[in-house]
Image: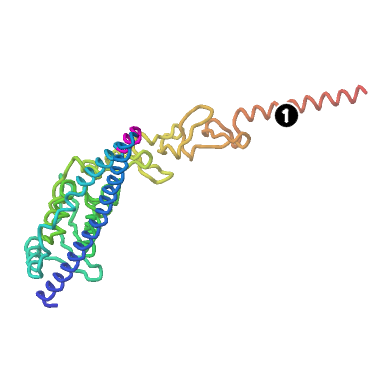
């Protein structure tokens, strides 16, 4: 497609979404003002009741009416504060097609190009590879979901995808200290980004998001950059330097040094807390290879504290039982002979 025609098509799609978004916000504002009207109506109703109570000398009823009016006035003040920005008339008009084409030209100049994907209804740019605090994170694609412009929620408008993912060792969904599941933690940029999108300043939008990606804010990361390349202990979740992790030969997971122990029986194999056991007799920590279960009592022992399939206590008890049986047999024999 001719570049000019393609930009014209994209600009028309963007303008359509901006117009729909502005209409939807006005409808949403209308719904919100209904709440204001309801509160005002309740104040008027209680005002009439207050007048009636005053005329008839019902001081208790008058006190209740004043209390309700006071509460409603506080709610109205809160409502006005929360909706002040929403109620303000739009300061800018919807951009013209020419202005939106100029925005696309600016995006092209700032980002080295853009990509329009009609089936996905997205306008995307690609950042240069990003490195923060010496940790390589790779390039990212910032994708504006054009249909999302019709919504008032920033999070439904765009997403950021790692093109050469180098996620945090402990969480694959965190591909950047400020990105989780392709959603950006905008911080102080939330309002400026929303304003840029509502006003059709798309070059500013892409620039602001890219600026967030290029700067590390240690106050609000999903995962701190200093913990990025460590290995998460499978047992406790502690991030450990790869050189200091231990591998359990039985479950196949990596653990910190506090969650793995050497077998005190063979002194060769490491086992994690979940895979290791304790000899009921000597108390040594033992790996599964050195664990034997007594066929009589079902307790676990190390190979040093058990015979082939029976522990010492059970063996002694069995011997006592056998000795008692022999003694009983001898006593029975003597009784028979005497009789």
Location of mark 1 (residue): 322
Which span is picked out in magenta? 58-65
How packed mark 1 is, by other alpha carbons closer than 10 Å (few <14, some 14-19, many 20 or more), is few
* Left-right relation of 303 to 201: right
| 318 versus 9 height, above or below | above
**In which quadrant of the rendered view does residue 225 lie?**
top left
Q: How far across and down, in percent of the image, does residue 247 sit?
A: 36, 42
Depth order, front residue of 201/334? 201
- Residue sitting at 60 percent across and 37 percent down? 309
Q: How many marks?
A: 1
Which is nearer the eye, 239 or 314?
239
Asked where in the image residue 61 lies, by quadrant, the reply is top left
Task: From the viewer's side, name the closer residue of 74 and 101.
Answer: 74
Q: Residue at x 16, y 59 (%)?
A: 198
- Horizontal arrangement in the rendering, residue 223 relative to residue 296 (left or right): left
- Secondary structure beneath dot 1 equals helix
Q: Is residue 49 visible?
A: yes
């Amino acid at each position: 497609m001719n570049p000019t025609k393609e930009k014209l098509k994209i600009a028309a799609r963007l303008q359509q979404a901006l117009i729909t978004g502005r209409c939807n916000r006005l409808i949403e504002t209308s719904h919100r003002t209904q709440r204001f009207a309801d509160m005002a109506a309740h104040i008027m109703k209680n005002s009439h009741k207050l007048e009636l109570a005053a005329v008839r000398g019902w001081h208790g009823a008058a006190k209740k009416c004043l209390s309700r009016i006071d509460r409603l006035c506080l709610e109205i003040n809160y409502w006005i504060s929360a909706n002040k920005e929403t109620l303000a008339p739009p300061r800018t008009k919807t951009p013209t097609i020419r202005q939106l084409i100029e925005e696309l030209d600016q995006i092209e100049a700032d980002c080295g190009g853009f990509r329009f994907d009609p089936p996905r209804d997205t306008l995307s740019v690609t950042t240069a590879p990003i490195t923060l605090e010496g940790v390589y994170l790779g390039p990212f694609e910032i994708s504006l979901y054009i249909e999302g412009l019709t919504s008032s929620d920033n999070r439904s408008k765009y997403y950021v995808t790692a093109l050469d993912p180098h996620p945090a060792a402990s969480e694959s969904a965190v591909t950047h200290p400020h990105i989780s599941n392709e959603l950006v933690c905008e911080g102080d940029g939330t309002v400026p980004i929303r304003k840029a999108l509502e006003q059709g300043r798309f070059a500013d939008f892409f620039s602001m998001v890219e600026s967030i990606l290029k700067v590390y804010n240690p106050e609000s990361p999903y995962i701190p950059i200093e913990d990025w390349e460590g290995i998460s202990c499978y047992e406790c979740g502690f991030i450990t330097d790869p050189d200091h992790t231990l591998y359990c030969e039985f479950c196949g997971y990596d653990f910190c040094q506090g969650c793995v122990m050497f077998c005190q029986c063979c002194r060769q194999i490491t086992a994690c807390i979940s895979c290791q056991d304790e000899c009921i007799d000597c108390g040594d920590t033992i790996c599964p290879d050195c664990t034997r279960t007594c066929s009589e009592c079902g307790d676990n022992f190390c190979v040093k504290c058990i015979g082939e399939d029976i522990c010492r206590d059970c063996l002694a008890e069995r011997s006592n039982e056998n000795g008692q049986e022999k003694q009983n047999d001898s006593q029975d024999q003597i009784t028979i002979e005497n009789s």
